[in-house]
Amino acid sequence: MTITNPQVLDMWGIPKLDDSTIILAITDHLGWANPTEQGEHLLMLQAKINAYVAFIESGEIYTEVPGAVGKYPIIQVAALYELSEQGERFIKQATAVLEPLGIGLEFEYNGDKEQFAAFRT
């Protein structure tokens, strides 16, 4: 379960501090340092986000995720590496597109490789 497999919902959860939302998480272990690979990284991220949007808009979220009805969906990218400038632009543009659809988008950087490795198994 990672960004490389757009057919899989990596993780989901309802935050205890805000039970009016549901988080659909994407685990992103790919780096941004290599400019050549940034394009591929962005395409994978876009494909994964699009799959999550389809999951939400189709209503499948309500049959697959208990308690999702009435919750505000937020797609959260849980990343091992900080965004590049190109990645930041993409997240800003994607957020602007998703907001009118009633879907949030967040990017969360977590540079702890050991903790992050647990998400990838």
Image: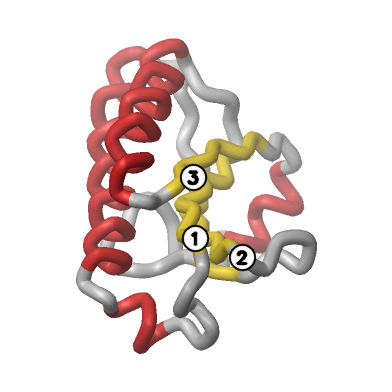
**Colour basis:** secondary structure
**Picture quadrant where residue 57 is located:** bottom left
Tell which of 57 and 31 is nearer to you.
57
- Residue 58: image location, x then y, percent: 21, 71
**CB under 8 Å between discs 1 and 2:** yes
As helix, strand or loop, the secondary structure at mark 2 comes to: loop
Q: Amino acid at mark 3?
A: Asp
Could you tell whether 74 is left or right of 119 in the image? Answer: left
Mark 3 closeness class: few <14, some 14–19, many ≥20 residues within 10 Å: many
**Picture quadrant where residue 2 is located:** bottom left
Mark 2 closeness class: few <14, some 14–19, many ≥20 residues within 10 Å: some
How far apart, in angstroms, are the residues tagged by discs 3 and 1?
22 Å
Residue at label 1? 72
How far apart, in angstroms, are the residues tagged by discs 2 and 3?
25 Å
Residue 28's label in the rendered image is: 3
Marks 3, 1: nearer the viewer: 1
Image quarter hosting the C terminus: bottom right
Task: Look at the picture and state if 31 lies above or below 9.
Answer: above
- Residue 78: image location, x then y, percent: 57, 46
**CB under 8 Å between discs 2 and 3:** no
How far apart, in angstroms, are the residues tagged by discs 1 and 2?
6 Å
Task: Look at the picture and state if 11 lies above or below 92.
Answer: below
- Residue 60: image location, x then y, percent: 29, 79
Tell which of 44 and 103 is nearer to you.
103
As helix, strand or loop, the secondary structure at mark 1 comes to: strand
Marks 2, 3: nearer the viewer: 2
Tell which of 41 and 93 is nearer to you.
93
Residue at label 2? 20
Task: Look at the picture and state if 18 lies above or below 33.
Answer: below
Q: Amino acid at mark 1?
A: Tyr
- Residue 61: image location, x then y, percent: 36, 76
